Amino acid sequence: MEGSSGSEKDFRVASSREVDLMALSQRDPGCLLRSALKEMKKYLSARREANKEDLIAGKVVSYLHQILMPQYPKAGLRSQRELVTLATGLDLLLDGDLGRLGDLLVQRFKAIEASLSADGNWSVARHQELIPTQASLSTRAELTEAAKAELRASKLRQQLNKGGKTG
């Protein structure tokens, strides 16, 4: 029967470009990454007055923030966080820090899984990730303490307002 399960027509045929990329990657694993890094280096070195060898550390995150993000300022929050996670992950891979890379990826996986739950609440799920929720010079501990202090102050204001209304 035509179109029956198991027929070759049921499978999507990869474009010649996809086949070429797959074959290239299989022949020379890592060549696509090396090629992308070479291109990133061109963009970054044009923006810096530095020794080109100094541009290796943090290269993908630097490219993301200096080149890519300014070109797409209206990118959605989820896309931005995905790009930050991927860029950070690639930099960790290049540094050979596989433990931290694994932690980063599994926490992103958990956050996406949580966002798919019945609540679909991304504002809660994003706190499972290991990337910062926003750019900040403050450490996570400082931000946590500031949030706790504000919560205490808010509760105190509520108590004082309740006391003032009954009097």
Image (cartoon, grey):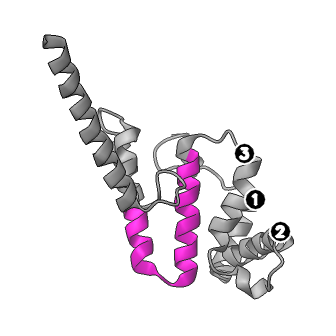
Q: Residue at x 52, y 44 (%)?
A: 78
Q: Is residue 145 left or right of residue 66?
A: left
Mark found first going from the N terminus, 3 or 2: 2
Depth check: give the residue in front, 16 or 48.
48
Q: Tell which circle, 1 or 2, labels the residue nearer the N-terminal end.
A: 2
Mark 3 is on which residue type?
A: Tyr
Expressed as whole percent of the image width and height from the top left, the position of residue 10 reads 55, 46
Magenta stretch bounds: 79-107
Residue ID for mark 1: 67
What is the x, y in percent for residue 132? 47, 57
For the residues labelled 3 and 2, the Cα–Cα distance comes to 18 Å
Q: Nearer the viewer, mark 1 or mark 2?
A: 2
Q: Which residue is mark 2?
A: 47
Q: How packed is label 2: few (under 14 Cα within 10 Å), some, or many (20 or more)?
A: few
Residue depicted at 78% across the width and 70% down the height? 44
Percent coordinates x, y for residue 20 in the rendering: 74, 68
Give the structural element (helix, strand or loop) at label 2.
helix
Q: Quadrant of the C terminus?
A: top left
Across and down, in percent, residue 91 comes to 57, 74
